[in-house]
Amino acid sequence: MPILNTPDFIFHNAIDFYKMGKKRATELFANDPKKDPYLWYHISAPAVNLSFSLELMLKTILILEKGSIEKKHEFVDLFKDISELSKNKIIKHFESSKPNSSEYPAVKFSKNEDVETSNKDSWTTEEQLLKILSTHSAAFVSWRYSFELSNLENTTESLEFDFGGMIRVIEAVANYLSDEIRNKLTTNSHISPLS
């Protein structure tokens, strides 16, 4: 029986949420999303899975570095708590990764507008990684309750999710964990590949 608060357990769950989110995003964006409005009914599930995956990965790093974690959920706060050495290595993984926004676009829902999509292929710097973390810091909660957008009084309210950017950040963090922290995990660890 696994111990639920171990880095092994948390990281394996993060990988599973990542795989489910990416698989569903891949299915949704296989065709031109602007040609099938029903695709947009399914955006929340991959956004939530990818967001939760990143939260769990950041918490895995914090448990490995500090032995415990505070009850925080926002990516920016979690990332700030990671050591500078770990941050720098994650940023290097991010900078060396290939942008994938042509395959996974950014989406934006607004209360009174159609869904917008865009491609962002220039996300290669530390500032861009931090912008993705900041933009998506509360994505897990926001997208989990995306149905509440229609009940909001403020017509400027919107939801954004950059699938390509988030996948790229998650892969940078996962590669960091696989490369740099594997030896700190239990000897029975079977770190799952991302693909």
Image (cartoon, rainbow, N blue to C red):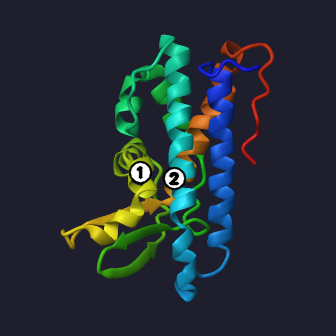
- The residue located at (52%, 18%) in the rendering is 63
- The residue located at (57%, 42%) in the rendering is 53
Q: Residues within 10 Å of mark 1 (few under 14, many from 20)?
A: many
> On the rendered image, what quadrant is the N terminus found in?
top right
Given residues 1 and 79, the one toward you in this image is 1
Quarter of the view holding residue 107: bottom left
Q: Tags 2 and 1 in contact by the CB under 8 Å rule?
A: yes
Q: Residues within 10 Å of mark 2 (few under 14, many from 20)?
A: many
- The residue located at (68%, 29%) in the rendering is 178
The residue at which mark 1 appears reads as 139
What percent of the width, then of the height, locates residue 51? 50, 47
The answer to whether residue 97 shows anywhere in this view is yes
- The residue located at (43%, 57%) in the rendering is 143
Task: In the rendered view, tell whether residue 70 sits above or below residue 19.
Answer: above
What percent of the width, then of the height, locates residue 71? 39, 26
Instruction: Report the amino acid beneath label 2.
Output: Val
Task: In the rendered view, tell whether residue 130 sits above or below residue 121.
Answer: above
Residue 48's mark? Answer: 2
What percent of the width, then of the height, locates residue 64? 56, 16
Instruction: Report the amino acid beneath label 1.
Output: Ala
Dot 2 falls on a residue whose secondary structure is helix
Residue 3's mark? Answer: none
Distance Cα–Cα, label 2 vs label 1: 7 Å
